Image (cartoon, rainbow, N blue to C red):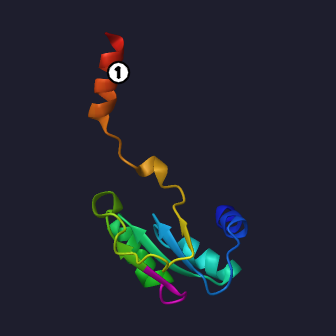
Amino acid sequence: PTRAAVVGTLTGLRAGQTVLDVGSGCGLYAAWLYDWFGVRTFGVDSVETAVSYAVRKISPQYPAKFCWLDIAQHGLDFVKAGSVDVAIAMSVLHYMRTDDQMFTKHNESNEK
């Protein structure tokens, strides 16, 4: 919850704004950000069970919608420009896949 408070404060979130939460997981940030700042959230995550939980438990209680999507494969083109005020991606980078072949080729070329 501390990260949500810090992000909301540093970005100047205000009641009525919309947050795009990339890697929204089970939707807890949507709840915290609404409780503390009064914002709406649109969450996107590639883990189907997490999104299902968010839809069942968070959406009925908060102004939040959630979508199951592999952003790495499909991108975010469906998000209309200007439709969100702030985009967050909390704790997402360590879940991103890497291109192991590129890394291996780069290291092999440096060894020669």
Segment tinted magenta in the rendering? 59-65
Q: Position of residue 98 (x, y in %)?
A: 35, 41
Above or below residue 23? Residue 15 is below
Above or below residue 27? Residue 35 is below
The C terminus lies in quadrant: top left
Q: Is residue 60 magenta?
A: yes
Q: Position of residue 55 (x, y in %)?
A: 41, 81
Secondary structure of the residue carrying tag 1 is: helix
The answer to which of 13 and 32 lies nearer the viewer is: 13
Mark 1 surroundings within 10 Å by alpha-carbon count, few (fewer than 14), some (14 through 19), many (20 or more): few
The image quadrant of residue 17 is: bottom right
The answer to which of 38 and 35 lies nearer the viewer is: 38
Above or below residue 81? Residue 7 is above
Q: Is residue 56 magenta?
A: no
Residue placed furthest toward the front:
81
The N terminus lies in quadrant: bottom right
Inspect the image, locate mark 1, and give the three-letter code of the amino acid beneath it.
Answer: Asn
Q: Position of residue 107 (x, y in %)?
A: 35, 21
Residue placed furthest toward the bottom:
60
Q: Residue at x 67, y 85 (%)?
A: 15
The answer to which of 83 and 66 lies nearer the viewer is: 83
Above or below residue 20? Residue 55 is below
The answer to which of 48 and 11 lies nearer the viewer is: 11
Q: Main secondary structure of the magenta part?
A: loop
Q: Position of residue 5 (x, y in %)?
A: 70, 68
Judge from the rendering whether residue 59 lies leftward or rightward of residue 38; answer left or right: left
Q: Residue at x 57, y 76 (%)?
A: 85
Q: Residue at x 30, y 26 (%)?
A: 104
Q: Which residue is mark 1?
A: 107
Judge from the rendering whether residue 91 lies leftward or rightward of residue 1; answer left or right: left
